[in-house]
Image (cartoon, rainbow, N blue to C red):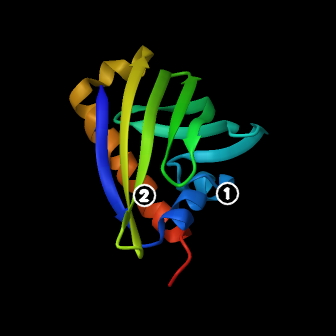
Amino acid sequence: MVLSGQVELNAPQDVVWSVLLDRNALQKSIPGCQELVEVAPDSYEANLKLGIAAVRGNYQARVQVSDQVPTDHYRLRIEGSGGPGYVQIDGTIRLAPQGGASTLVQYEYEVKVGGTIAAVGQRVLGGVAKFMMGEFFKAMRSQLPQA
């Protein structure tokens, strides 16, 4: 399943870049994130507690940021597994200035799931994934410095 979208954040591009890659902001913004520990530069281990439809569980995940071109784009890979199954997410985040005062964030991800969680179905998973991306960016907005 491929997910893509965009959101405009009310902060300059360099500020949005910094916040999107800040460990504390990420932990507060990733839905269900209980813990996010940096294990190497741009590499994290996460403990997530998520419920998707009737399937709920805890996941251990590895999060890797790579291919960074500062303030322009980066690649994000997440691999997680838990009782309900596994998830692999590989995607790109691109930033573009919008008149200097705000930034357009475009994202595209390929998502693979397996195990019990895959039984939920593509339609439901697609809706849940879009909801989670919305929650992520809603929380990320609150991490941006207020003008």
Image side of residue 44 versus residue 143, left or right: right
Amino acid on which the number 1 mark rests in the picture: Asn
Residue located 55% across and 55% down the image: 20
Name the secondary structure under disc 1. Answer: helix
Residue most extreme to the left: 123
Q: Which residue is mark 2?
A: 137
CB-based contact (under 8 Å), mark 1 and mark 2 = no
In the rendered image, the quadrant that contains the N terminus is top left
Residue 145: quadrant of the picture: bottom right
Q: Tell me residue 22's x, y (percent).
A: 64, 55
Residue located 67% across and 52% down the image: 23
Q: Tell me residue 94's x, y (percent).
A: 42, 47
In this view, the residue in front, 65 or 89, is 65
Q: Tell me residue 100's x, y (percent).
A: 41, 73
Q: Tell me residue 11's x, y (percent).
A: 46, 72
Identify whether 91 is placed above or below 102. Answer: above
Tell me, for residue 127, which label it has, or none.
none
Q: Tag 2 or tag 1, which sits nearer the N-term? A: 1
Q: Which residue is mark 1?
A: 24
Image side of residue 118 versus residue 49, left or right: left
Residue 62: quadrant of the picture: top right
